Each structure stands twice: as structure tokens, then as C-alpha cells.
Image (spheres, rainbow, N blue to C red):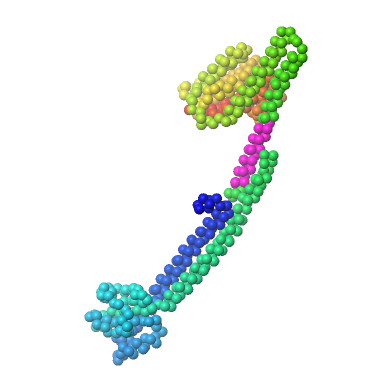
């Protein structure tokens, strides 16, 4: 049953909650009203019994020549008359002085008499009678007055009140249900509008947005958050679309070249030298294709990496020296100058947590780009410790990057207009950016055309 309630629509759940809350309040209020009325009727009836008892005692003890029968007739005509009243007056020796209980309906217990003689007013129920005991003083003696009667009128009023309260509760529950249904419908209308709008949004219409209303209440903030998510999705799908298009183009170029060269090669018999030359060209295209594939796989890997999975401690200076050695081994003309700031006094200041192979790829790409696009093939690398970060600066005096390309240079396959004469795929910097982000770091780039580029990498230390 609870599972079914949980599966109900929000509007139904809100209506039931509204009904339950209103019903509980009405029931508590009705019980309070009934108990208060019952208590008031009880106190009022006891007061009437007390007045009746003292009135009878006054007539009996303060009026000369009045007998009991006459007192009974006088009290029956009294405006303080109560139904089936019984008055019993006892002296100190428990002798009956006055008794209107002809049938002996009222049972008087000794412990009740003892409490009354101690000065207490007692009241108790002896169905169907309500009984009151009180002490009456005269000049010469003390008397116990036992007064009893049936509160038929009060019981009838309470019964009517009970029926009225039950009817009011039932009507209120119905009104609470109707009000809750309309109120919840009105409250959830903005959400219903959002749901209808979302149903119209598909992968081909990510430019659509839901209505944000006033944008300040919970539903408005939900709509704004959803619209921001749509913006991110639209951007991601756009980047994915461009990535696929660019990747397809980059892959198609070497494949087309390989296919063309092999078709030309097979048109007629060639000399051994011609075969070697053509196969060498095909081999270069295959190497380029392999390199591009590896870079694409690396981008896919870094995009899926989670920084919390990195637990290996790495010295960033060792990464720099290793990359310097590997690059200069295969590129004799590259000059890589590494300098350390005086602020680095402890080896622990150079330790970061991450993946050493990924950091090597990032550093290799930055160094290779700096050397490749510089006429002197030189890059100056400086690193220092700043608070809880290690800062590594890569500076070259190459062709530079135009201001308009600064924002796009970290997009996959994007290359500046001044790099057409240089070989490359436009994957290096996006790969660097993704790797550094996965290590909770940042990459900043400052560049001017013809003056060079400065790339600053910040990585958190241990």
C-alpha cells in the first residue's frame, strides 16, 4: 500500500497530505471543543447542585416552623430546580435530618462522608445520577449535605454537540479535499508547463528553453537550472558534432592519400625505386594516421578520467627532466632550458598527485608546440612553488597566437590561421587542457602575434 501511495502523482499526494493535515486539525479542534463543553456542563451542574443543596439547608435550618414536606414543595417550585433531584442531610452522628430520596437510590459510603467532614467538596457519578457532597455549618453543629440529580439536559446538549461536530468534520474533510485538489493543481501548474515544454525538446531542438516564471521561487530556480543544463547539453552536442566532423575529416585525409597512392601504384609495373618511394609515402601517412588515432583515444581517455582515482605521488621536476631527455633525443635541434625558482627549498613542494604518463603527455605537447612554432626551436621552462601550488611556465619566442584565437585554441582540431604551414592536428592543446583539469589544475595562455607565447600551468601540491 505504501508503495502505491509513493507512486501516486505529486498532485494526489499533496491533496492527501492537505486532507490529512486539515483532518487532524479539525479532529483535534472538535475533541477540544467537546471536552471543554463537557467540562463546562459538568461544572455548571455541580454549581447548580451546590446552590440547591445550600438553599434547602438554609430553608431547613434558618426558617422556623418549616417542616420537611413543605421544604420539598418549596424546592420543587424553585427556579434552581434540577431533574430527579435528591437531597440528603446528615448530622454529625450520621442521623438523617432531611431526605428527599424516598426510594433510597443514592448510596452513601462512609469514606465519602469522612472526606466531606474533613472540609472537602466531593463529586462522583452514580449512574445515572451526578452526586455532590458538601459540609454545611450552623451555630451549633455541622451537617453533611448529599445532593444528587440527573443532568438529562446537559447530556442531551452534549449528544447534539457531538453529532454537530461529526457532521462539521465530515463536511470539512470534503472541503479540504476539494481545496487541496485545486490548490495543488494551481501550485503544480508551472511544473506541468515545464514537463510539457520538456517533452517538446529533443536532440534536434536543444535550443528550446522552458519558461522560468519569476525566476525567484523554487520552481523558477528549477527552470533556470534546467535551462543551464540544456545550454551545457547544447554546447556539448555542438562540440561533439564538430569533433566528429573534424575527426572524420582528419582521418579521411591520410586514408584518401593512401588509397590514391596505392591505386596509382597498381596501374602498371614499377621499378623497385618507385615502389620504395610510394611505400615510404604510404608509411608516412600510416604513421600520421596512427598518431592521430592515438591522440583521439587519449582525448577520450582523459575526458573519462576522474581525479579522485589518482593516488600516485609524482615529482613534477622529474617529469620535466624526463621529457626534456626524450624530446632532445629525437629532435637534436630543439633547445629546452629548465630553471628552478629559489622558492623551491623542499622536494615536497614539487610533489603532485596524479598519473605520470598523462602528465608526461601534457608536458611533451607544450614543449613540442613551443619548439615547433619558434624559429630558434627554443623553449624556456621555469617552475616555482606558490602557496599550495606548483607553477610551471613554458615560454617561447615563436609565431604567437592571435587574440581572436585565444578562446578557441583549446577546442579539438582548431588551429590558428598562422599555423597552416606547420604540420599538426589541433589536438595537442585540448589534450593538455583536459589532462591538467583532471589533475585539479589550470592552464593559462598569453600570446602575441610575432612575439611568442607563454603558457602557465598550475597544479596543486600534496
Q: Say which residue appears at 52% left-offset and 26% top-offset.
A: 354
Q: In the depicted view, which residue is nearer to us: 111 or 331?
A: 111
Near-viewer residue (62 or 399): 62
Q: Which residue corresponds to the image point at 68% horizontal and 31% vertical from the top-left?
A: 242
Residue 432 x %, y %: 60, 26
**Going 31% across and 88% down the picture, which residue do you hit?**
68
Residue 180 % position (x, y): 57, 59
Asked if residue 294 shows in the view, the reply is: yes
Q: Residue furthest bottom?
A: 65
Magenta span main SS: helix
Residue 54 sits above or below residue 367 on the image: below
Number of marks in the rendered image: 0
Residue 398 visible to an observer of this rendering: no
Residue 301 image position (x, y, % from top left): 58, 28
| Residue extending farthest left | 93
Q: Quadrant of residue 47?
A: bottom left
**Magenta span has 175?**
no
Q: Is residue 2 above or below residue 388?
A: below
Point out the residue furthest to the right here. Answer: 268
- Residue 70 vs residue 333: left or right? left
Q: Is residue 223 magenta?
A: yes
The residue closer to the viewer here, 295 or 16, is: 16
Which residue is at 67% across, 27% downward? Answer: 247
Residue 123 found in image quarter: bottom left
Q: Is residue 10 above or below residue 146?
A: above
Q: Which residues are magenta?
A: 221-242
Amino acid at each position: 500500500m505504501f508503495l502505491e501511495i509513493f507512486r501516486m502523482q505529486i498532485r494526489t499526494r499533496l491533496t492527501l497530505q492537505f486532507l490529512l493535515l486539515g483532518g487532524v486539525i479539525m479532529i483535534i479542534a472538535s475533541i477540544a471543543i467537546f471536552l471543554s463543553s463537557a467540562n463546562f456542563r459538568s461544572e455548571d451542574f455541580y454549581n447548580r447542585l451546590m446552590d440547591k443543596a445550600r438553599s434547602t439547608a438554609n430553608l431547613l435550618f434558618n426558617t422556623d416552623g418549616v417542616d420537611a414536606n413543605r421544604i420539598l414543595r418549596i424546592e420543587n417550585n424553585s427556579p434552581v430546580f434540577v431533574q430527579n433531584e435528591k437531597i440528603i442531610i446528615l448530622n454529625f452522628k450520621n442521623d438523617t435530618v432531611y431526605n428527599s430520596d424516598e426510594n433510597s437510590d443514592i448510596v452513601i459510603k462512609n469514606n465519602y462522608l469522612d472526606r466531606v467532614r474533613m472540609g472537602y467538596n466531593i463529586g462522583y457519578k452514580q449512574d445515572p445520577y451526578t452526586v455532590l457532597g458538601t459540609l454545611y455549618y450552623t451555630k451549633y453543629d455541622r451537617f453533611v449535605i448529599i445532593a444528587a440529580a440527573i443532568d438529562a439536559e446537559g447530556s442531551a446538549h452534549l449528544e447534539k454537540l457531538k453529532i454537530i461536530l461529526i457532521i462539521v468534520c465530515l463536511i470539512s474533510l470534503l472541503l479540504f479535499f476539494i481545496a487541496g485538489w485545486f490548490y495543488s493543481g494551481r501550485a503544480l501548474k508551472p511544473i506541468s508547463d515545464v514537463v510539457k515544454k520538456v517533452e517538446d525538446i529533443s536532440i534536434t531542438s536543444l535550443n528550446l528553453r522552458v519558461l522560468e516564471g519569476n525566476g525567484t521561487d523554487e520552481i523558477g530556480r528549477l527552470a533556470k537550472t534546467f535551462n543551464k543544463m540544456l545550454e551545457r547539453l547544447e554546447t556539448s552536442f555542438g562540440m561533439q558534432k564538430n569533433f566528429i566532423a573534424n575527426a572524420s575529416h582528419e582521418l579521411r585525409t591520410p586514408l584518401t592519400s593512401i588509397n590514391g597512392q596505392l591505386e596509382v601504384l597498381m596501374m602498371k609495373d614499377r621499378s623497385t625505386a618507385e615502389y620504395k618511394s610510394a611505400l615510404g609515402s604510404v608509411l608516412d601517412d600510416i604513421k600520421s594516421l596512427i598518431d592521430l588515432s592515438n591522440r583521439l583515444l587519449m582525448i577520450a581517455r582523459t575526458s573519462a578520467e576522474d581525479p579522485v582515482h589518482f593516488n600516485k605521488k609524482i615529482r613534477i621536476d622529474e617529469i620535466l627532466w624526463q621529457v626534456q631527455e626524450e624530446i632532445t633525443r629525437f629532435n637534436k635541434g630543439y633547445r629546452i632550458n629548465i630553471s628552478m625558482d629559489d622558492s623551491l627549498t623542499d622536494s615536497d613542494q614539487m610533489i603532485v598527485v596524479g598519473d605520470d604518463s598523462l602528465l608526461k603527455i601534457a608536458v611533451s605537447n607544450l614543449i613540442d608546440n613551443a619548439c615547433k612554432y619558434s624559429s630558434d626551436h627554443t623553449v624556456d621552462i621555469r617552475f616555482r612553488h606558490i602557496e599550495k601550488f606548483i607553477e610551471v611556465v613554458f615560454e617561447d619566442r615563436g609565431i604567437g597566437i592571435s587574440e581572436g584565437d585565444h578562446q578557441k585554441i583549446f577546442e579539438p582540431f582548431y588551429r590558428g590561421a598562422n599555423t597552416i604551414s606547420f604540420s599538426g592536428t589541433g589536438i595537442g592543446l585540448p589534450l593538455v587542457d583536459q589532462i591538467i583539469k583532471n589533475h585539479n589544475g589550470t592552464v593559462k595562455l598569453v600570446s602575441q602575434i610575432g612575439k611568442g607565447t607563454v603558457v602557465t600551468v598550475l597544479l596543486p601540491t600534496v
